[in-house]
Image (cartoon, helix red, strand yellow):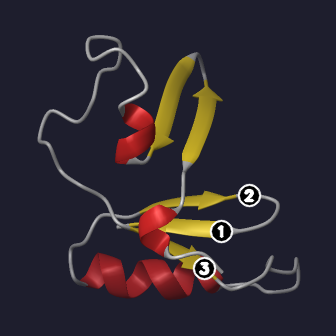
């Protein structure tokens, strides 16, 4: 298990012709400064890795258990699920 401060993170999504890229600050430095449209508010997200191993298909309701208290506290969240791990960005 790596320290979360040192994990390189890069996620690419293409939905209805729109591209979203989520990456850590160190990865962002590899792109030319005028290439990416970044958050205009300058907000920073923190990543939380869900579980220490891949989640099984029978493990239902995990996203809801994370999202409900965050929503109640008016905290934005972005959830990314991959084959090996799930991540919540808050």
Check disc 3 and report its element: helix, strand or loop.
Answer: strand
Q: CA distance from mark 1 to mark 2?
A: 6 Å
What residue would you read off at disc 3? Answer: 50
User: How dense is the environment of label 3, judged by Cα within 10 Å: few (below 14), some, or many (20 and up)?
Assistant: some
Where does residue 6 sit, x and y in percent of width and height? 48, 63
What number is the disc on residue 82? 2
The residue at 55%/81% (across/down) is: 64
Where does residue 73 sit, x and y in percent of width and height? 22, 83
User: How dense is the environment of label 1, judged by Cα within 10 Å: few (below 14), some, or many (20 and up)?
Assistant: some
Front in this rendered view, residue 64 or 28:
28
In primary-sequence order, the first of circles 3 and 1 is 3
What residue would you read off at disc 1? Answer: 86
Where does residue 52 sit, x and y in percent of width and height? 70, 85
User: How dense is the environment of label 2, judged by Cα within 10 Å: few (below 14), some, or many (20 and up)?
Assistant: few
Front in this rendered view, residue 76 or 38:
38
Where does residue 54 sit, x and y in percent of width and height? 81, 76
């Amino acid at each position: 298990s790596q320290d979360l401060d040192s994990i390189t993170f890069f996620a690419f999504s293409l939905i209805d012709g729109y591209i979203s890229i989520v990456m850590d600050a160190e990865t962002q430095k590899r792109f030319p400064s005028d290439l990416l449209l970044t958050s205009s508010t300058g907000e920073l997200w923190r990543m939380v890795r869900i579980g220490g191993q891949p989640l099984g298909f029978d493990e239902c309701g995990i996203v809801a258990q994370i999202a409900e208290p965050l929503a109640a506290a008016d905290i934005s969240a972005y959830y990314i699920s991959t084959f090996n791990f799930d991540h919540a960005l808050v």
